[in-house]
Image (cartoon, rainbow, N blue to C red):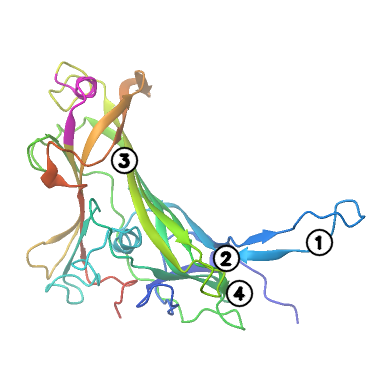
Amino acid sequence: MSSAQGRKALRSLRFRIETTNGTPVAPRFIYRGMGSLDDARTQENPEEQIGIFGGGDRTYQPALLGELSLDETDLTFEQFSDFLLMAGMGTMATYPLQGSAQGASGSTSVHYFVIPSDTAPPTYSYTTEGGENAVEAEYMPYTLVKKISIKGAGGEALKVSYDLVGRYVERTNDLGTFSAVGTARTVETILAAGSWWITPSGSGFGTGQVTPGNILAFELEIEPAWKEKYSVDSGTIYPGTFVYTDLSITGKITMEFQRSGTYGAAGTGGQKAKWRNQETQLLRTYWPGGTIPIGTTYLNKFLQIDIPFKWSKFVALGDMDGNSIMEGEFFSKYTETTPAAGRGTILIVRRGTSEFAGAN
């Protein structure tokens, strides 16, 4: 009898929050996207002179590490929150991701994330499990997010990709099977058609709505700097901990090349002029979703991102199918002119609780 052959369509990835960072748990809920675990352990083949061309094949493995790149896929209301936790944006108010008092199954669940500024955030790690049940499954404990890339363009869905890191990658068990039968929950794709506000520094988020039709596309990259820490006093060769050391937020916005007051690219009060004047602004983006039939305070799903930003560069005038456009690059950091804005916040309202963070 021949052995089972691998099938790409039969692969899956599961995530589950860990009670203790680095202590594996059994994930059950399936990630609605694609990616494969990568055993990134270090293997050395030392150079030596033993009278043979090329030397010998003696090797050793001094350090373990795991990595995972999740391919670009649709961003959903249901599976974004956990990756923000893994990226270091969680506070005690946002975990567990089972919402507020409204968080009963099927009703409104509110997930609020503060982008770290002057205080190191708590570390919420996950166990990742991936592979094929008919061939072999592997797991990676202490999973954290090193990069989130979000893209949006008119007439499309929001897209997201992730880079993750973990303690190590090993077989789940001697049989190579998954630790639990996988469950795929229903998710809703977030469409790129939303609303944008660009507010002068000194005001609050959410005033000065951009005239519809000015923003054509955008990119946003969030990169928390997790540094793996190996030690010589633990008796292990995997990282004992990962330390949050910094955060970078950058992006691009593609705009119509037109005069539209402060929200167009051109003109004396336009965005390119604000770059030349080195002005800080506050950006709010809002993407609505489906209704929540038994919701209370919020009656529909939505994703809202608030960040302060400053233009760093405008590229030369371009075109999109013959239509003149202008692309600006920006960064988001703490701003002295609007200190209350901090580094910003991310708010997700969805239906029901977070599967990866403890829902049944």
Q: Nearer the viewer, residue 173 or 211?
A: 173
Q: Amino acid at mark 3?
A: Gly
Percent position of residue 348, x then y:
21, 58
**Cα separation between marks 4 and 3:** 39 Å
The label number, if any, that marks residue 64 in the structure image? 2
**Cα separation between marks 2 and 4:** 20 Å
Name the mark nearer the viewer: 2 or 4.
2
The label number, if any, that marks residue 98 in the structure image? none
**Residue named by callout 3:** 155
**Residue named by callout 4:** 136
**Which badge, 2 or 1, is on the more N-terminal residue?**
1
**Residue named by callout 1:** 57
Kindly tell me whether residue 287 is visible in this rendering.
no
Percent position of residue 7, x then y:
61, 66
Magenta region includes residue 189: no
Q: Amino acid at mark 2?
A: Leu
Residue drawn at x 38%, y 68% is 125
**Cα separation between marks 3 and 1:** 55 Å
Q: Amino acid at mark 4?
A: Glu
**Which badge, 2 or 4, is on the more N-terminal residue?**
2
**Which badge, 3 or 1, is on the more N-terminal residue?**
1
For mark 1, give the secondary structure: loop
Asked whether the residues under the numbered discs 2 and 1 touch, taking CB atoms below 8 Å apart as contact, a structural biologist would say: no
**Cα separation between marks 2 and 3:** 43 Å
**Which badge, 4 or 1, is on the more N-terminal residue?**
1
Q: Residues within 10 Å of mark 4 (few under 14, many from 20)?
A: some
Magenta stretch in the rendered image: 269-281
Residue drawn at x 24%, y 32% is 310
Asked whether the residues under the numbered discs 4 and 1 touch, taking CB atoms below 8 Å apart as contact, a structural biologist would say: no
Q: Nearer the viewer, residue 114 or 243?
A: 243
